[in-house]
Image (spheres, helix red, strand yellow):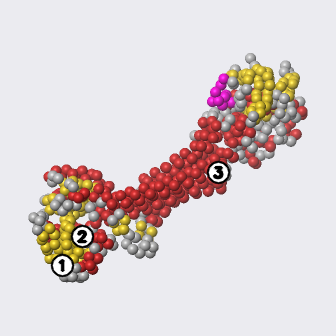
Amino acid sequence: MALIELHNVSKIYRLGSQSVSALSELSLTFEAGEFAVLAGPSGSGKTTALNLIGCLDRPTSGQVIVNDMNLGTASSRQLADFRLQHIGFIFQSYNLIPVLTAAENAEFTLMLQKIPKAPRRERVRRLFAELGIDGLEERRPADLSGGQQQRVAIARAMAGNPRVILADEPTANLDSHAAEELLELMRRLNREQGTTFVFSSHDDRVISQARRVIRLEDGCLAGDTGHDR
Amino acid sequence: MVDYLHLAWKNLWRNRRRTMITLAAIALSIMLVQALHNLSNGVYAGMVDSGVRAGSGHIAIYQTGYLDSREENLDFEDRNLVELITALDGVEQVLPRLYIPALAQSSRESRGVVLIGVDPQRERSINPFLKTLPEDAMVRSVDSRDAVVGARLLEELQIKPGQKFVVTAQNRDGTLHSELLRVRGVVSTGMKDVDGSLIMVGRERAGMLTGSTGSVHEVAIILADSDSAETVLGEITKLLDDHPGTEAVKWERAMPNLANAIKLDYASQKFIFLIILLIVAIGVVNTLLMSVMERMREFGVILALGSQPGTLRGMILLEALVLGLLAAAVGTLLGTLATWYLVTVGIDLASLVPETLEFGGVVFDPIMRASWNPGWMARIAGYVVGLTLLAALYPAIKAGRITPVEGMRHL
C-alpha cells in the first residue's frame, strides 16, 4: 500500500472572474521511505502538489490519500490533527517564529502535541546534535545564518517523528555550499531513519541529488524517473 | 498552558513601544475611573453623612402619610420609643423632632418660618450646624424659651441675639397660640431657604404652641455604621408594633431630593466611565488587529504545522488576557496611589467656588475627599480585563478563519 496517492487530482484557483488551473488530472504514488523531488519551472504546480499532499489545501477534483486517509472527506479539524501527527514541513524562507529561540521553534510542534517540557527538550537537544546545530538552542532566528535557520526548520519538521517531510524549495534561499550540506543532511535522515522526503525544486543541482524525479509542466505530469530505484 | 502563556508574553513584547503605549492607555483609564469613582463615593458619603445628621437620620420614623403630605396633625406620641431605640445595638443617637409652620414677629417685621422642636442635648451632639455653636448660644432645655435662629431670618426680622420675638401657630383646637422666645444663638447653614426660615426651640416649648406636648413628627435615628441600616430597621419595625400608624423608613425615602441627586450624578458618571472604557476598547482592538494582521504569514505557518484554528484563537486571546491583567495591575496600583492622595489631601474647591456648595439640599465640604472602595476598584479592573478580551475577539476570530495556504501567502 502506497503512503501517498494522488488520483486524477486537479486544482483550479479562482482569481476574480478568472480561473487558473494549477494542477490537471495528476496521478502519483509515493512509497514510504522515498526521497523524491517535484521538479519544474515556476508555475508548474510543484507547490500546489505539495500543499495537497500536506493537507494544506483540498483538490478541486480527484482524490488525495495520505497514510490511508482520504483528505477530500476529512474535516478541517481532522486535517490539522493529521498534519500535526504525520507531516513535517520545511519552507523556502524557513518561517521560524521570530520571538522564540531556536530550541523553542523546534519544540513548537511537540508543544502543539501537548508533550511535556522535559521530553520535548531532550528530543530537541538530540535533534540539534544530529543536525550539527547544538549550542545554538538559545539563539533567536535573527541571530542565525540561513543554513542554520533551515536546520532549525528541519529539526522542527523532524521533532514529531512524522511519516512524511514535505519541503518547498528548501535550498532556494541558501548558497550552494549550504544547499549541498542541507541536501546531504536530508538524504542521511532519509537513509538512516527511513523518513519519506518529498521536496520541490527547480535547481538542477538539487534535482540531481534525488532518487526519484517527478517533472511537472503546466500542472501536468511531464516525467517520472527513478520510481523503482 | 504555561507554554502558551510564555508564548503570549513573548508575542506581547514583539513590538515593545506599541505594547507600552496600549498598556499605558488601559492602565491610565483604570486609574482614572477608579480614582474618580472613589472620589464620587467619598463625596456622596460625606453628603449623605451631613444630610442624615442635619436631616432625617439614617432611619426615620413618621406617622404614615406625613412624609408625603407634611401635615402637622400627623404627629405621634413617642412615649418611651426614643429610649428603646437608643438602647439598640448600632444606634449612635436618636433625635425626636416636631416641625411646626408658624409666623415669627419682631417689633419691626414678620416672616413665615418652620419651627423645629428638638431635644437640644441630643441634637447638638449630632447636627453639624449646631456642633459649632458655643455652649451659651444653644437652647438650654426642652421647655426653655431659648431659640436658635437662622442667620438670614434674624436679619430679616431685624433683631439681634438676646432680643425677644414672638411666634404664632395654629393650635390643635383651631385657635392661634403665641409664644414669646428669645434669640439665644444664630445658625448659618449656607442654604438660603433654611437660613431664612429656621427657628429651633426645645421640643416641649414647641409642643406647647400647638398643644401637642409629648408628640413628635419625626424620630431621626443616627447609626454608628450606615451599613447596618437594614438590620436596625428590622429591629425598629418590631418596636413600632406598639405605635400603630407609624412607619420606619431609610434616608433615601425620607430625603428623596438628596437620594435622587446622588443617583442622577452617579448615573452621569457611569456614562462618562463607559465612554472612557469604550475609547480604551477601540484602542485595544486597533493594537491587537495590527498585531494580528502583521503576523498572518506566521499564523499560516502555525496552522500548517498542525495547530487547530481554536488553538490559534486561544493564543491571541491569551495575549489579550496577559495585556489586560498587566494593565489591570499597573492601573490599580496607580488608582490606589491616586485614591490615597484624594483620601488624605483631597481637592479643595474653596478657591474655585467661593459660595457655599449645595447639592440635593445638603451643604457639603468644599474639600472633596475620596473614600476607599476596594471591591469596586477590583470590579473596574475586572471589567477592563473582560473588555480587553472582548476587544481581542474580532482579531482572534479573523486569525482563526484563515487557511494555512492563505496565511502563508501574506508577505
Q: Chain of mark 3?
A: B
Q: Please report, as a chain letter, where disc 2 is located.
A: B
| Tag in front: 1 or 3 | 1
Q: Residues within 10 Å of mark 3 (few under 14, many from 20)?
A: few
Cα separation between marks 2 and 3: 62 Å
- Is residue B72 visible in the rendered structure shown here? yes
At label 3, the amino acid type is Trp
Q: CA distance from mark 2 to mark 1?
A: 23 Å
- Vertical placement of residue B166 versus B262, above or below: below
Task: Choose top left, top right, bottom left or bottom right for residue A169.
Answer: top right
User: What label sits on residue B124 in the rendered view?
Assistant: 2
Who's the residue at 20% across and 65% down the image?
B99
Residue type pointed to by label 2: Arg
Q: Residues in magenta?
A: A73-83
Disc sitting over residue B103 in the figure: none
- Residue for badge 1: B165
Based on the displayed image, in which of its 4 quarters is residue A66 positioned?
Answer: top right
Q: Disc 1 sits on a residue from what chain?
A: B
Residue A75 versus residue B138 in the image, above or below: above
SS category of the residue bearing label 1: strand
Query: What residue would you read off at disc 3?
Result: B13
Q: Give the percent coordinates (x, y) of residue B387.
A: 53, 48
Dot placed on the residue nearer the N-terminal end, 2 or 1? 2
Quadrant of the image occupied by residue A87: top right
